[in-house]
Image (cartoon, rainbow, N blue to C red):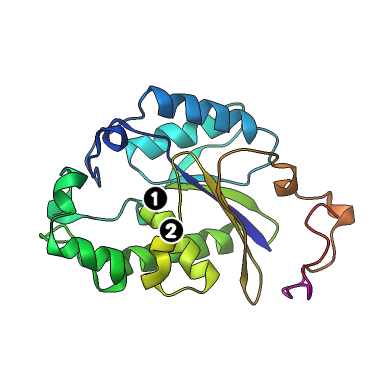
């Protein structure tokens, strides 16, 4: 089974200012965000990663680079993990966008939401490309891999909704804070969502056991009754 750690970038100047950054270039982490990703890099330092793949946007590259410190890995980028393309909404203040008719669609029926302008896309398109990226990297890296994907709030929420078997219209129920990790393990028959919006605590459970202790093939079955936990 392949495990992906979904990492949202640290807080940015746009986040702090209430601006929808989208694909605006050169949006960087603010001081809080820089501190968040330094702590995150230290927290994940013991987790062996097969790859670190990032949205090409600078705030994600900054965040992913903190995870790469001390590792013999190259940062890879994938446009499919990039932010939702908000079109004409890009760069506008959230306090203005809440007054737009489309805002209610995004909140209540996001699968039908298509952002305005020639550069806008639908949230359903965002989900399709992001899930395809995760599945493709899973296949490339193999069934024993633990890898990290650094992306954006709505993108990660869309991936988690797919993994949870939720319709995209339910994805606003999921919270993904800056510099948080969410973890999904993919098996032959289903994904298991292991963590959501985790901003602290032990990560030892993410470290794969030595090969000699692994089963020949990890089960895709869920344990009836819930089992003893990953540390058992």
Q: Secondary structure at mark 1?
A: helix
Q: How many marks?
A: 2
Task: Give residue 123's position: percent from left, percent from top.
Answer: 30, 65
Quadrant of residue 95 in the image?
A: top left
Circles 2 and 1 in contact, beta carbons < 8 Å: yes
Residue bounds of the magenta highlight? 219-225
Q: Specify whether residue 21 is painted magenta.
A: no
Q: Position of residue 88 (x, y in %)?
A: 12, 53
Residue 18 spot, x, y in % from top left: 25, 39
Residue 195: x percent and y percent?
61, 54
Q: Secondary structure at mark 2?
A: helix
Tell me which residue sits at (39%, 50%) in the image: 153
Which residue is nearer to you in this view: 130 or 100?
Answer: 100
Answer above or below: position of 101 versus 208. below
In which quadrant is the N terminus drawn?
Answer: bottom right
Q: Is residue 220 magenta?
A: yes
Give the residue at mark 1: 153
Check the image and report above or below for 28 versus 137.
above
Which corner quadrant holds the C terminus? bottom right
Magenta stretch: dominant SS? loop
Q: Which residue is mark 2?
A: 157
Out of 4 and 12, give the one closest to the viewer.
Answer: 12
């Amino acid at each position: 089974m392949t495990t992906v750690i979904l990492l949202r970038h640290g807080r940015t100047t746009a986040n702090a200012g209430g601006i929808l950054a989208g694909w605006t270039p050169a949006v960087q982490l603010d001081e809080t965000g820089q501190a968040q990703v330094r702590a995150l890099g230290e927290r994940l330092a013991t987790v062996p990663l097969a790859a670190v793949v990032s949205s090409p946007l600078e705030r994600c590259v900054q965040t992913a680079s903190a995870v790469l410190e001390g590792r013999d890995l190259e940062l890879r980028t994938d446009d499919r993990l990039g932010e939702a393309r908000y079109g004409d909404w890009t760069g506008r203040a959230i306090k203005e966008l809440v007054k737009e008719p489309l805002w209610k669609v995004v909140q209540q029926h996001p699968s039908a939401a298509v952002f305005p302008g020639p550069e806008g896309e639908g949230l359903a398109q965002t989900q399709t490309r992001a899930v395809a990226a995760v599945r493709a990297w899973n296949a490339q890296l193999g069934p024993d891999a633990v890898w990290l994907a650094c992306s954006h709030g709505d993108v990660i929420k869309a991936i988690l909704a797919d993994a949870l078997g939720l319709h995209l219209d339910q994805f606003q129920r999921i919270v993904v804070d800056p510099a948080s990790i969410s973890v999904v393990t993919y098996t032959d028959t289903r994904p298991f969502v292991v963590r959501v919006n985790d901003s602290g605590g032990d990560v030892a459970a993410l470290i794969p056991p030595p090969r000699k202790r692994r089963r020949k093939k990890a089960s895709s079955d869920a344990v009836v009754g819930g089992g003893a936990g990953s540390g058992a």
